[in-house]
Image (cartoon, rainbow, N blue to C red):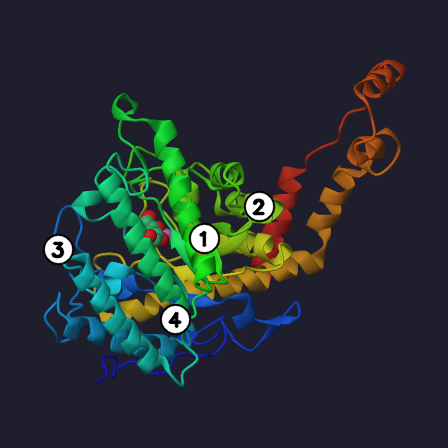
Amino acid sequence: MSFFDNIPQVKYEGRDSKNTFAFKYYDPKRVILGKTMEEHLPFAMAWWHNLCANGVDMFGVGTTDKSFGCVPGTMEHAKAKVDAGIEFMQKLGIKYYCFHDVDIVPEDPEDINVTNQRLDEITDYILEKTKGTDIKCLWTTCNMFGNPRYMNGAGSSNSADVFCFAAAQAKKGIENAVKLGAKGYVFWGGREGYETLLNTNMKLEEENIARLFTMARDYGRKIGFTGDFYIEPKPKEPMKHQYDFDAATAIGFLRKYGLDKDFKMNIEANHATLAGHTLQHELRVCAVNGMMGSVDANQGDMLLGWDTDQFPTNVYDTTLAMYEIIKAGGLRGGFNFDSKCRRPSNTFEDMFFSYIAGMDTLALGLIKAAEIIEDGRIDEFVKERYASYESGIGKRIHDGTATMEECAQYAAELKKPENPGSGRQEYLESIINNILFRS
Ligand code: XUL
Ligand code: CO
């Protein structure tokens, strides 16, 4: 059964092509800085937005038909989504997919055992259908925020019964990661936070989240999961405050509980901006802490200020993100498009146009980031800016051998420091423009 008969195989045609179903920049086999573009950019399809979301929002019903000829909520529909997803990925040359448990099967409202049986059946089906293809699972995750039982959190719930359901779901999610050969298992703590401190035992909630992560780590390693666990930081939405606020907060938390060797970050662009950061900032925090894991690729809207999950089309942002990623030696995971078509972009063609736009925007970002690195002016400026730490007192501070008395003595002899030098921000920004917009 095929669903996208009228859509051709999407191939690279180059920047002058006007073919709507062609890549203008993503040329999978092109080598950039010693690696092919597809090695730099392991793209993944997000099951939930692409195969499940139909445009429903708080103000209106769906605008896109994602029934794929079946009755939603049935296993027949779940299987049709697998077929549609594989066809979609193959037409675009996407090698990975990501899902929440409830994206791939309907959850039984009464009995978790029934849901788990359905998960066994659908993961068998996915394995059967992807056999002989190069399509693999990037990461699995569990929806521990949608069901009413999670209204007060999952690991952070006030209810121990609910904690156990979160543990049970995550256990199955990790087993599915092993079964499908996934590179990772993601924790996004949508409800792991609070609405008001007046009813919240923050200490217990945070400790319980750490207990859940520790159980997951220990169980995963016991059953042979060798991939990474990922935290996906987000400061707010749906909760007023979420404990995994941003990368720095999540990394500090993991270190406190001895989980930083097994966990890395899954950074989402629109979550970064909600935290008041840029995607580049969040990636830099990961890079300097050895926590670069995976990326949920999307962008927000500066004027809206919530998690709009738009496909990335801003080349300036993807260039600076790719600059960080290349310098950190690449991603351990991949680029999952946690992005959805706008509600009025409601045709199957739009699903393809959106992925083509997102993949091309990251590909162009990669090309431009490599040019910035090869150009060398930015790196050279930064190196020079910190040159005072390469010799003399600066070197001793850097090496950790200088004492406070020695620094004070040095200052006393100098009487007054030299001007530390211009930051040259505008000059540096003009270099980026020059590289982005030269023909
Ligand atoms: C929500 C979000 C999630 C996670 C997986 O903002 O990003 O879809 O990526 O649960
Ligand atoms: Co996400």
Q: Secondary structure at mark 1?
A: helix
Q: Nearer the viewer, residue 208 or 339?
A: 208
Q: Where does label 1 land, which residue?
A: 218
Q: Where does label 3 land, which residue?
A: 109
- Structural distance between the alpha carbons of marks 1 and 3: 29 Å
* Amino acid identity at mark 3: Pro
Where's the C terminus, which quadrant?
bottom right
- Residue 46 in percent (x, y) is at 34, 63
* Amino acid identity at mark 2: Arg
Instruction: Reply above or below: 374 against 291.
Output: below
Q: Are marks 4 and 2 in contact (CB under 8 Å)?
A: no
Q: Are marks 2 and 3 in contact (CB under 8 Å)?
A: no
Q: Where does label 2 land, which residue?
A: 284
Residue 309 shows in this picture? no
Q: Nearer the viewer, residue 221 or 179?
A: 221
Disc nearer the start of the sequence (2/1): 1
Q: Residues within 10 Å of mark 1 (few under 14, many from 20)?
A: few
- Structural distance between the alpha carbons of marks 4 and 1: 19 Å
- Structural distance between the alpha carbons of marks 2 and 1: 29 Å
Q: Nearer the viewer, residue 275 or 151?
A: 151
Q: Are marks 2 and 1 in contact (CB under 8 Å)?
A: no
Instruction: Reply above or below: 136 against 271.
Output: below
